[in-house]
Every structure is written in C-alpha cells, then in structure tokens.
Amino acid sequence: MLIKIRFFLSIFIFLLCTSAYSVESSWSSGVESKVRLISPYTNSDNKSSIYLGLQYKLQDGWKTYWKSPGAGGFPQNITWSSSVNIKNIEILWPTPIEFKILGLNSVGYQKEVIFPIKLSIIDITKEIRVNLDINYLVCKDICIPGNAKLSLNIPPGKANTTKHFFDIEKSLSQIPNKIFNISDIEEVITKAYLNNNNVSIIINVRSRNKFVDPKFFLDSEFGLPVQNPILKYSSNSKEIEAKFSFKRKLINKDKFDLSFLLIDDNSTFEFLDILEVEKNVTSNTQFTSYIYFLIIAFIGGFILNFMPCVLPVLSIKLLSVLQLSNNKKLIHRSFIMTAIGIISSFIVLALLAILLKIMGVNIGWGMQFQQPVFLMVIGTILFIFMLNLFDFFEFKTPNFVNNSFLFKNKLNLKFKDFFNGFFATILATPCSAPFVGTAVTAAFTQSYFVLFGIFVFMGLGMSSPYISIAFFPSLITFLPKPGYWMQILKYILGLLLLGTLIWVGLLLLNHFNYFFILITIFIMIAFSLSIIFLKQKKFVGTILLISFFILPMYFNFNYDGKLIESKWDNFNLSKIEDFIKDDKIVFVDITADWCITCQFNKLNVINSKEIQDMFDRNDVKLIKGDWTKPNEDIEAFLNSYNKFGIPFNIIYSKSYPEGVILSELLTNKEIIKNIELVKKN
C-alpha cells in the first residue's frame, strides 16, 4: 500500500512540475489557426536575455500578416503587462512573402511561422513568468480575427536544449540581416521627394554582386499599401534604383522613420533611415541619366549607317539620288521621306516592344532574325530589288496611280523613299554597333516613356545623314555627273544585294537543309526566266512566290544539327559554374550567324592567332552560346545581365564569379588585359 502511495505521489509531483515549468505552452486554437509559445532551453541559463518562439500553424490557404501588411490587414499585437521578471519584450519578424488577399496586395506568412521573441530579464536569479495576450488576423476568402492567451514559466539556472531549439534557430536565421559590413551591400541611399500631390520614395542600392530578382517591402508608421516599385538597373546590374510613389495624404509628415526589406537571391537585409521629404524637387540624377541615354541612342543610331547590314539600302538610295541629278527640290523631298521612313520604323519598333513587354514576352535586339519566315520575306525583297537593279523589270504602281514608272510618279517616288528608310532599319537590327547595345539595354530596362524616347532618338541618329543632305542638297554636287558609268554602278550595286541575299540564305541553313536551298535557287531561276520570256509573268511569278512560302508547310526541310568548333563547348550554365569551381578561367561568347558585329569580333579578334595562343597558354575554357535560333537558356542568361542584344562576351574566374563583361566591339588588347586581371586575382 505504501509503495502505491509513493508511486502516485511521484506521478503527481511530475505532472505538477511539468505544468509549471514546461518547454512549451498549450496551443491556443482558433477555427483556422493555432498559436503557442515554445522555448529552446529548459532554464534561463543565467542570461540577461533569452529567446522564445511564438509559433503559428495555419490551415492551407490561410495567411497572417507581417508588421506592415498593407491595406486590408493588421499585424499581430502582443500585450505582456502581466508577465513577471521581464523588463522588455521584442518581437522579431522573419522574412515574409507577398500575396494577394481579397484583391489586395499584402505581405505576411502562410502554413507555419515562428516569430522569435527576445526577453530582457530583470533578475537572472529568479523565475520568469511569460503571460502574453495576442490579437492577430488570419485571412483567406474572408478574414477572421484571433486571440490567444499564452503562459510559460522558465526557471533560473543552468539550461539544457529542448526539442524546439533547432526550430527557433532556423527562425532566427530568417530574420533580415542588419550588419552590412559582412555582406555584399556597399551603399544605400534613401530619399523622399514631394512632386505635386505625390511623395516619391527612391532607394538606391549598390552591391558587389549583381542583383537577380530583388524585392522591396516598406515599413513605416503610415501603414502604406504594398506596392511594386519601378526598378532601374545599372548596366552591370550591381546598382539598382527602386521608386515608390504614394499620395501625399498617405504620408502626412515631412520627417518620418522608414525601414525596408531588400530580398534578393535568398538573402534579406533590413535598412533603417530617417527621411525628410524634399519639397518641389526633381531628381537631377534621374533627368541627367535620361539625357545620357538619349545621347547614346542618337550616337548609336548614327553609327548604324556605317554598318555592313545597311549597305544594300544605302546603295539603292545612292542610285536614286544619282538619277535625280541636280534637282534640289526632288533631292530634298527624297531624303526627307527616307528620314521619315527610318524614324517611323523606330517608332513602330518602340510600340511593338512596349506591347510585348506588357504581354510579358522577353524581347531582344535583332530577335526577328531568329525566325525563318522573316528571313524568307527579307530574302524575297532583296531578290526583287536585285532583279530590278539588273534591269529584269521596273517597279510599277497599281492602275489607280496612273500605271506610271517608279521614278516618274511623285506619289510612287515618295513611297519608294519611305520604304527605303523603313527597310534600312529592318536590316540594321542584327547590328549591335558601339553604343547601340547600351541604348537598347537602357530602353528595355526603363519605363515605357523612356523606351519610346530612346527608340525615337536612335531613329533620329540613323536618319541624321539623310536630314543633313535634305537641307543641304548642294552636297550632292560632289558626286560625278550622270553618265554611262551609272549603268555599271547599277550592276555593281546589284551584286552587293546578291551578296546580302547569299548571307540571308546562309542564315536559312540554320533552319532548313541544303535541299530547301536548292529548291529555292530553282524557284529564283524560274522566277527570273519567267520575267524575261513569259507573257503571263505576273501570274507565274506570283505562283512561284507562293510556292516558296508554302514549301516548309508540306515538306520536311528541318536541319537540327550544327557543327561547333572543337575547342568550344556548347553553352551550359552548370558547366560554367563547374569550371569556376575548378579554378578555371572561362570565356563566354554569345553569338549568332545573323549578328554582323559578332562575326567581325570572331574573324578579327577571337579567332586571331594572338588571342587563340593566349587562350591556350592560360588554359581558358571556351563556351559558345549560339543564339541564331531561339534559345530560352541563352535568353535567360542575357536577361540576368540586363542584356537584350548581342554580341555578349564575359570572362569568369574563381575570383570573379559574377564575371567581367567585355565591350560589344572587341579588341585583342581588351581580352588580354581582362584575362590577366582575372588571372592575377
């Protein structure tokens, strides 16, 4: 009997102690959630501050809120006034996620989250009694407020870890980092401007590494709505500007505290600052950067005139000017119409780029040359122009325009000049001349307004020689007088178009086999002979052209294989990372057969004996990414560096895992210099 009494007494004492000094509180259960307190230690371990965990478990689809949740929600509120031996309680907020609740953007947590709670102890020799009264909100299709009253007693003395230790440590690791001297962040500048009735908060961050997919969450006393900022990247993606815009009535103070989270590449940083709203101030830096981009766009457009891509159209234009002789009025009108054609084509490209961006489609400079149908259309136009120069036929207008010859009808002449300008722009798009890449990158990473402005200024730059001659037609007098030599020049220009046509044919070999090219040549010969010998030349020519375009629909001309130089590996991001881990220097060349600048770099620099010997001496691993045809991996790689055109060349090493980006127009000196740089470090 005495033994039984001792047994039950022991059980009673054990249960009493467990209740009094538990490592966790009981769950406070709501309909869609439950909350409890957990402790990582059995005792206070004689420390002046300790951490507990406030653990939430939510049913699927239900969410609770971060400390600044945006419109429609509120964060948890904790009252601890009835606690004993506690000087202060500080709640820490793990990195949240963004979601949409009831049509509103919000920030918070789902499924399960542990909030670390830091307790500051009054007397480390005494027991700690934690009594929390918590009001919180959970939402799904509706929002339900919750209340939890939690208690936990923690005795003093030496402590052992509990089963909750690692869960709380994991939660602590998710707390945003506030120590920047051990991170990649180099500088943070935060400003606030008042423009009309809006307050703009502009955050500039500079990092040692490039940004991947940054997200910003603001926290202030105003409870601002969750907003996706306008992001602007530097050319190397290591600097970023985030711009938020709020109504003045939401920010009703001229000086306020602001903290914000920067989440990027699995890292989170929290920044604290005191902002003072600067009234009636426009960001001079922003305005200056716009002007800079527009100047670069103008210069890049001007240089496009001297790229071989545009040579065929310039040749046709030269011939038309010679035929106009010294009629200054016609010369003025001809060149103005060509300039209008160029500018109009850039406006069309800008509007198309904006539309594709709105639709979420990735865009790139010259990407239309990846499409076989586009190449077939361009090839057809070049072929018809070539036959015209070889005197197979002359362009005629429809009957409703008096059926007159091209150079005798004013309306037709204007259309011809306008089309020359439009066609010149189309042929210019595979050229990434100096400054063009910078302008295009700026356009595709800025607002729609800036994108439109950059494209218009590129058009103005490319059309500037035509505008100059239009207003100073006396410059034409420097050309020889018309004569028989013009007929010879006409044939020479036709041969230039034939060379361009052959280039387009080689591009088509990336999509079709040689059998398709042979059939195409047969159709071209038949078309030419029909013009010379047949009376029904229009009918036969139309049938042949239709046959050319429907051939790929009914026959399999696909060409799937492509040889690559033995020294080069095909583009593979994992392979690049493996080479870097093995302490190898990696040279990456993103190229395409339709990219004229790429071919110039290849023939004159990359394949030169000096560079190839230097690659061999330093055991440089060569990676080639062929973007002649659409390739999602290469496209994503270019976008990660905010590049939207090629050529793109970059050098990696263990010391430079983020890479060293090279110029669009390469030189031997630049490659050698940067190889030595990554090798030394």
Image (spheres, grey):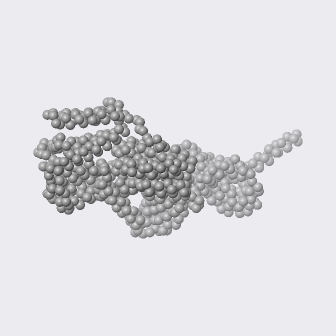
Q: In the rendered view, does 529 fall on the left or right side of 100?
A: left
- Residue 433 image offset from top left, x and y in percent: 35, 54
Q: Position of residue 23 (x, y in %)?
A: 71, 50
Q: Residue 233, how many percent across, how many down?
A: 44, 57
Quarter of the image for residue 132 reads: bottom right
Residue 413 vs residue 248, the one in the foreground: 413
Q: Left or right of 410: which side holds 666?
A: right
Q: Closest to the observer: 467 or 283?
A: 467
| Left/right of residue 644 with respect to residue 468 in the rendered view | right
Q: Residue at x 48, y 51 (%)?
A: 614
From where the camera sits, is residue 188 visible?
A: yes
Residue located 43% across and 41% down the image:
564
Residue at x 18% of width, y 61% of height: 474
Q: Is residue 552 visible?
A: no
Q: Looking at the rendering, which quadrant does residue 111 occupy?
A: top right
Q: Quadrant of the C terminus?
A: bottom right
Quadrant the N terminus occupies: top right
Vertical placement of residue 474 versus 105, above or below: below
The residue lying furthest to the right in this view is 2
